[in-house]
Structure formats: C-alpha cells, structure tokens
C-alpha cells in the first residue's frame, strides 16, 4: 500500500499538469478547450471505470488516516475534523478530477499539437449569468466538469440562446475537441 501512494500522487500530478496545459492553451490560443460530445460519450464509461476505483482507493486511504488519527492518544480536534473532511470530500473530488482528466487529456493534446481549423456541433445546456471568473458564459450539454463552459460570449448573442439549441463552435482542434474561437447557431 505504501508503494501505491507515490503512483497515485504521480497520476494526480499528471492530471494537474494536463489541466494546467489546458489553461496555458487557453492563454496561447485565446480560448477555452471543449472536447467533442461524441468523444465524451464514447469514452465516458472508460473514464468512470478509472475514476470510481481511484475515488474508492482515496476513500480507503483517507479512512486509514482517520482511524490512525482517532486512535492516537493526543490528537487535536482540528486534526480529526480535517481527517473526517478528507474521508467525506476527497474521494468525490478526486473521482471527478480523474474523470475530467481522462476525458480531456488526449483531445486537448491532439488539438494543441496537430489541430487545424475545425467545426464541432454542441447543444446548449444553459446561459448562466456572469460570474467573477467567467463573464457572459454559455454552458454546453453533456460536458465533463472543468470543460464545456464558454466565456466572453457577446451578451446580445447569448440572450438568443436557450436550453437545447444547437450551436457550432469553430476553432483550432480535431474531431475530438477544439479551442473554441467562434460560436454560431445551427440553422
């Protein structure tokens, strides 16, 4: 079990690097990355089959840590609360993060390295109001966490969108995903 923990940490670090690459890609190409709905639906079972056992493993490790802290003779309430928080929250967060990493790693890298001008069709999930991090956002349906949100969509165009409407995104990418530069309604 002790040798497994460094491997898990390396995998987490790799996922973090992939998502930092996505942020860097957004800076380099000026847009956020969106995997295609076809790629997400085709690979979602694979992503979940990796994310669920990984979340369970983190749950077991957090439970072991909590049990050790609980049995320790002099342990602070703060330590017990943090260990308990880890048992309740970390497996879920880790599972969601792993799923998003599995679903975005390959399409993101291929779009950045060998992508060209591409168009992909999506459905609008909602046109949530502005937020501090993402003004004038449009959320796309069926996208994994940390992807599928378009920021800085012109407000007059965003108001014409509603749930279920089909849109075409254009930008640098492949059939598996793209860095969205333009959005248009499908006619």
Image (cartoon, rainbow, N blue to C red):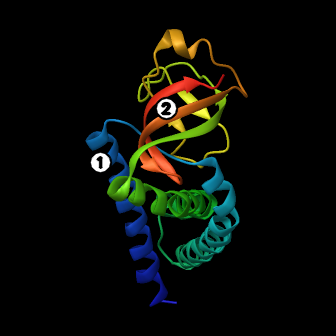
Could you tell me which residue is drawn at 29 percent across and 48 percent down? 24
Residue indicated by mark 1 = 24
Residue closest to the eye, 137 or 185: 185
Q: Secondary structure at mark 1?
A: helix
Q: Residue furthest top?
A: 156
Could you tell me which residue is drawn at 44 percent across and 73 percent down? 11
Task: Judge the density around disc 2: few (<14), some (14-19), many (≥20) Cα neighbours within 10 Å.
Answer: many
- Separation (CA) of disc 2 from disc 1: 16 Å
User: Sequence order check: which comes first, mark 2 or mark 1?
Assistant: 1
Quarter in which the C terminus is drawn: top right
Residue closest to the eye, 73 or 61: 61
Asked if the residues shown at circle 2 and circle 1 are in contact, with their CB atoms under 8 angstroms apart, the answer is no
Q: Secondary structure at mark 2?
A: strand
Q: Residue 44, image x and y in percent? A: 67, 61
Residue closest to the eye, 158 or 53: 158
Residue indicated by mark 2 = 150
Query: What is the number of callouts on the image?
Result: 2
Could you tell me which residue is drawn at 55 percent across and 19 percent down? 129
Could you tell me which residue is drawn at 56 percent across and 77 percent down? 61
Q: Relative to 182, is 108 above or below? A: below
Residue 81's disc number: none
Q: Residue 40, image x and y in percent? A: 63, 55
Q: Residue 48, image x and y in percent? A: 67, 65
Q: Quadrant of residue 108?
A: bottom left
Task: Judge the density around disc 1: few (<14), some (14-19), many (≥20) Cα neighbours within 10 Å.
Answer: some
């Amino acid at each position: 079990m002790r040798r497994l923990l460094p491997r898990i940490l390396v995998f987490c670090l790799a996922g973090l690097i992939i998502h930092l690459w996505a942020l860097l890609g957004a800076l380099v190409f000026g847009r956020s990355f969106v995997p295609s709905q076809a790629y997400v639906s085709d690979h979602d079972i694979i992503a979940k089959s990796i994310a669920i056992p990984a979340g369970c493993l983190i749950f077991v490790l957090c439970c072991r840590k909590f049990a050790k802290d609980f049995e320790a003779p002099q342990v602070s309430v703060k330590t017990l609360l943090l260990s308990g928080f880890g048992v309740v929250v970390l497996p879920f967060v880790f599972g969601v993060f792993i799923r998003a990493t599995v679903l975005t790693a390959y399409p993101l890298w291929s779009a950045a390295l060998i992508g060209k001008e591409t168009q992909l069709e999506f459905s609008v999930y909602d046109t949530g109001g502005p937020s501090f991090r993402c003004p004038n956002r449009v959320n796309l349906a069926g996208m994994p966490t940390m992807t599928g949100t378009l920021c800085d969509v012109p407000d007059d165009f965003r108001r014409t969108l509603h749930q279920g409407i089909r849109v075409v995104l254009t930008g640098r990418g492949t059939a598996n995903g793209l860095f969205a530069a333009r959005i248009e309604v499908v006619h």
